[in-house]
Image (cartoon, rainbow, N blue to C red):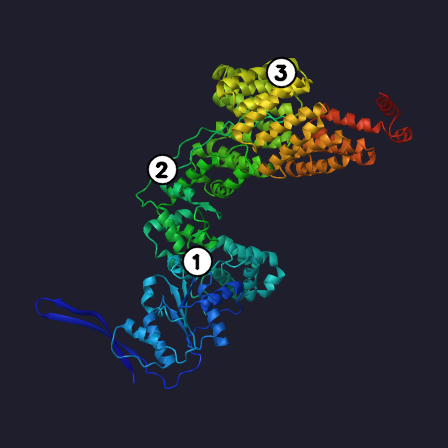
Amino acid sequence: MNNPFKQTGIKASTFGDNAQISIEQKIILPSVPKQVKENPHNLPNSGVEKFVGRDEVLSQLATQLQEANRVAISTLTGMSGVGKSELALWYSWQEWHKKTYLGGILWLNVAESDPGLSILTFAQIHLGLILPTEGELVERIRFCWHNWFKNEQDQALIIFDDVRRYEQIKDYLPPQGEKRFKVIITTRNEQIARNFNPIDLEVLSPDAAVELLAVFLPNAVVNNPEKARELVKWLGYLPLGIELVGRYGQYMSCDLTKLLSQLQAQKLKDESLQFPQNAFMTAQREVAAAFELSWGELSESSRLAGEWLSLFAESRINEKLILSLFEERYPQPQPLKRGAIERYFPTFSRWFGLSKSVSASIDPPDLPIPTRTDLRHLVNLNLLNDVDNQNYDLHTLIRMYLRDKLEASAFKEEAKRAYCQVMVGIAKTIKRTLTLKDIDNLEPDIEHLKVVAEELDQWLDNEDLTWSFYGLSAFYRAQGLYQQGVLYCERCLTLSEQRLGKNHPDVATSLNNLAELYRAQGKYAKAEPLFLRAQAITEKQLGEEHPDVANSLNNLAGLYYDQGKYAEAEPLFLRSLAIREKLLGKEHPAVATSLNNLANLYCAQGKYAKAEPLFLHSLGITEKQLGSDHPEVATSLNNLALLYDFQGKYAKAEPLFLRALAITEKQLGEEHPEVANSLNNLAGLYYDQGKYAEAEPLFLRSLAIWEKQLGEEHSDVANSLNNLADLYRAQGKYAEAEPLYLRALAIREKQLGAEHPYVANSLNNLADLYQSQGKYTEAEPLYQRAIAILIATLGENHPNTQTVKNNYNLMLSQLPDEELSQRFPPEMVEMLRNLRQN
């Protein structure tokens, strides 16, 4: 006989004077069977053929459920598609086979059925309970809990699957004092999870993800394991996505290359991510539909936050950066700093000639402004991952889902423009000299900046067009990663020409920046025509006496200086100086830069009498305009001290080097790269005087700072290694010097390319070391390679080329006369003999 009970909806409510209505719901439950099966359950079948990658979580779940002294409630939380229900189901079946829960295993699909009624049905059918015929639903469920167990030692497992709100289950949980009940709750809502013992289910590890794919496509994975790894990475290691794609590939007999190609083209719309017809799976939704469940629970402002978040890259996103997008609070730009001149490898203070800073402003549409609360809502529903309470990240597939939402939004244009303006603000803060700490802080933002340069450039205003590219190229250049910087400079040049026209001043700036990167790589033949074109554009568009023309002249002159073309460089430096003096005044910092560069030119030519007054004048302007303790003053002091060092005026050089060191330590901190530069220069002074004991600790400290701040493979580290090796060679410590020379050579070849003049410098130094030991066979090919590089890059008559050729000839002169006569013509043999005698 069926067993009815009543549930009251409205009770004893009065309408009018005498009317009384009582609404009752009569629920007919099936009759109770006469016999109850042992080890009862109502578990659905699992659609998983092999469960992978969750052993640790299964162990953690089992431990949590069995160690509690009261009712144990464990929550499995995580994003949609991560496998919460599958894990709970797999655990339940595993324990059913072990007969761990002889009191029964009850599976409650909270999203699709009333859990209260399901509890009553299970109690009657599987436990044989005879329920009271009267009372509220909650009271009848409480009766079930109190009469559940037939044996004292039995335990029962209750699974509340897909809980979205705590109110759905709070009246139906087993009594807290009854420890024989074990409860699993699966939910996307982290607020629910925090009330109990949470287990946050992450995506699969790369190896486990490939193993899951192999369940469906075993031969394809074995035959192409690299493509399998690429495919599961694209899916973000999400189990639901992997299973859907695997089943689709199995059904369609697709290879992995074709599957990945389809996904990259169609993204979430690809049919491989739709729910397959006639497939037996635990999950009953496609990927997008799974995310849609969480989306439906968001407020308008939280949805807006999610849509705009999709613009960020797949990288850590700082909360302040997110809120600056929402609130239109953009970072303030900071000017790029000019680099100091270094000992042995002087470089000029160069100007990028960047566009003027334009403050970002958006006329916002009538939208709710998302706040941190909206971010927390997204986190609670596992649409956004909270990394450390200050930073967030988005799963690959969720980002695609949210981007689709944004593209369908009426506000996508505003979102993209706002994103571009915020990221341009970041680009304007990137300095030309970066420490490892700077790089580490910038790295996540760099990925987001790439989105602007690679995906959203059409939403950049003309005034801001080039900034994202400049920022990226400066970031990579500061690390010596010149080729990556070149790619963004080339893209910037192409885009500027297309958008602004080939003769726009910003095109000239793009040309200058690209040429500077080629110059840093020693690719002078590529750099020169770009510098020349930049100069022509600025003169035509801005007139022959514009500050930007002075910048272009300065850059071109610096290129000629690097090549030893001093006659070509001098008039350009002089003209740049004259323009700056006329337009900016004779005591402007830019004039000091021109004086400094011209003085370096004279110094390189040995024209010390002409260089000294220019260095002194530059120092005077810098001290007056910036203050006596400014870092730029330290740069001027270093350059003047180097001049005196070159002339052997050590007593005049030392106090200047010491003062420069004191300024940099005070203003920049004791571990700043500019401090390392000052230490290096002071050590060089002591080296020149033969004060090796004083020089060594300074060289070592300089090297340690550069390695710590810039990384062990930075070109400045190579310079420092080279100088320290010179010190050891001068003392005859050849065993200590050789590994340093070799390491410096390896760094320069890696960072600058095998044909850079600095590589030739390292080859020469290493060859000199071998020559000092009489190892002529090892030295000769190094000299020959160095000479070939220098002739190709600097020319036959450059001082550096001549120096290395002289070193090579000196080595040859040490060979026996018989060998010389066999290898060289008589006139060459005679020259080498004379060199030996002299």
Q: Which residue is under mark 1? A: 79
In the picture, the disc for residue 216 is none
Q: Quadrant of residue 398?
A: bottom left
Is 648 situated above or below 207? above
Q: Which residue is under mark 3? A: 611
Q: Amino acid at mark 1?
A: Met
Q: What SS does tag 3 mark?
A: helix
In the rendered image, residue 241, in percent from the top left (x then y), is placed at 48, 60
Question: Which residue reaches farthest bottom?
Answer: 34
Quick one: label 2 or label 3, which is nearer the N terminus?
Answer: 2
Quick one: label 3 or label 1, which is nearer the N terminus?
Answer: 1
Q: Is residue 504 visible?
A: no
Residue at the image point whose x is 43% and y is 30% from the top = 357
Q: Cβ–Cβ below 8 Å for labels 2 and 3?
A: no
Q: Amino acid at mark 3?
A: Ala
Q: For this rendering, which residue is in front, 532 or 130?
A: 130
